Amino acid sequence: AKSKTVCSGIEWNSMLGLLVCLKKDNKVMPYLLISTGAYLGLRAKDLLNIKWIDILGKDEITIAESKTGKVRSIAVNESL
């Protein structure tokens, strides 16, 4: 039998609190991964395909979503 995965989101303020804790504890890699995913709104698979050169100094990035194949442009939040 096929199983169905269900995912629920995290409240924005809870996510910001998590980022504060990660930064305080010097957990750099989780901090970067979670903040980039949250600010760009990407699925994990798409997020892992992005390189820093794609984001740094850019106002917008273009990505082909792996699940849908849809190409979209995403504004890079200045907080990122």
Image (spheres, rainbow, N blue to C red):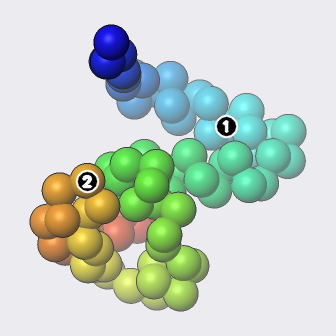
Residue at 26% in and 78% down: 62
Q: Which residue is mark 2?
A: 67
Residue at 74% in and 39% down: 22
Q: Quarter of the image holding residue 60?
A: bottom left
**Percent of width and height locating residue 50:** 48, 72
Q: Nearer the viewer, mark 2 or mark 1?
A: 2
Give the distance between the C-alpha atoms of the residues marked 2 and 1, in whole angstroms: 31 Å
What is the three-letter code of the residue carrying label 2? Lys
Counting every numbered tag in the picture gives: 2
Question: Secondary structure beneath disc 1?
Answer: helix
**Neighbours of disc 1 within 10 Å: few (<14), some (14-19), many (20+):** few
Q: Quarter of the image holding residue 76?
A: bottom left
In the image, is residue 6 above or below residue 38? above
Q: Which residue is mark 1?
A: 20
Residue at 85% in and 47% down: 26
* Residue 39 visible to an observer of this rendering: no
Q: Is residue 49 left or right of residue 5?
A: right
Q: Residue furthest top?
A: 1
What is the three-letter code of the residue carrying label 1? Val
Between 10 and 44, the one nearer to me in the picture: 44
